[in-house]
Image (tube, grey):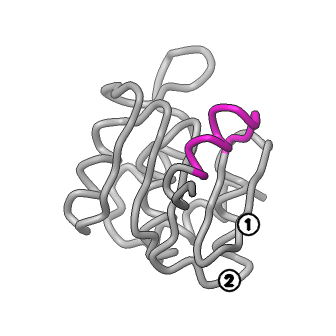
């Protein structure tokens, strides 16, 4: 029998998804890149408390949204150090494939847009507002 934690990781690595959430036998998966699928999940108002989450990329923006959803555990293929520090402070279990200092934009000239939008934000609620402003 496969655990939900193993399920989300397998779905991410073998299913070609960018985001997978699983809790209580129900699951959500997205192939869409960027912050939008996670932001849409927050907007939906669905309860993902104590869910297992797996993401291709975990930045500070994603960590704040996962905190807003009150997930219980996170796996990321690539995780930024600032995201891991946020999860640690909230006692959210995590694991990752690779850790990077920060997530950069495509040109590698600065922070990714979502990361820049939440650079100084500590509150998940404030992060949702800031990310909605750039996702329009």
Q: What's the residue at 46%, 30% (across, down)?
A: 78
Q: What's the residue at 70%, 73% (across, down)?
A: 26
The residue positioned farthest toward the left in the image shown:
89
The residue positioned farthest toward the front in the image shown:
1
The residue labelled by disc 2 is 46
Q: What's the residue at 49%, 56% (across, down)?
A: 5
Quarter holding residue 132: bottom right
Quarter holding residue 133: bottom right
Q: Quadrant of the N terminus?
A: bottom right
Q: Which residues are magenta?
A: 7-18
Image location (x, y in percent) of residue 50: 45, 76
Q: What is the number of the mark on residue 93?
A: none
* Sequence order check, earlier mark of 2 and 1: 1
Quarter holding residue 123: bottom left
Image location (x, y in percent) of residue 126: 46, 73
Image position of 114 (left or right of 88): right
Q: Would residue 25 be counted in the magenta stretch?
A: no
Q: Is residue 136 above or below residue 106?
A: below
The residue labelled by disc 1 is 40
Crowd band around label 1 with a 10 angstrom C-alpha radius: few (<14), some (14–19), many (20+): few
Give the secondary structure at mark 1.
Answer: helix
Q: CA distance from mark 2 to mark 1?
A: 10 Å
Q: What's the residue at 65%, 53% (across, down)?
A: 20
Q: Quadrant of the C terminus?
A: bottom right
Which of discs 2 and 1 lies nearer the camera? The answer is 2
Image position of 77 (left or right of 123): right
Q: Would residue 11 be counted in the magenta stretch?
A: yes
């Amino acid at each position: 029998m496969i655990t939900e934690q193993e399920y989300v990781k397998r779905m991410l690595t073998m299913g070609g998804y960018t985001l997978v959430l699983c809790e209580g036998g129900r699951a959500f998966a997205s192939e869409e890149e960027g912050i939008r699928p996670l932001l849409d999940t927050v907007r939906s108002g669905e309860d993902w408390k104590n869910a297992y989450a797996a993401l291709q990329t975990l930045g500070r923006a994603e960590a704040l949204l996962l905190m807003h959803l009150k997930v219980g555990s996170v796996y990321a293929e690539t995780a930024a150090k600032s995201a891991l520090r946020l999860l640690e402070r909230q006692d959210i279990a995590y694991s990752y494939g690779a850790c990077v200092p920060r997530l950069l934009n495509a040109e590698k000239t600065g922070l990714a847009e979502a990361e820049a939008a939440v650079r100084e934000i500590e509150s998940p609620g404030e992060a949702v507002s800031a990310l909605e402003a750039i996702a329009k």
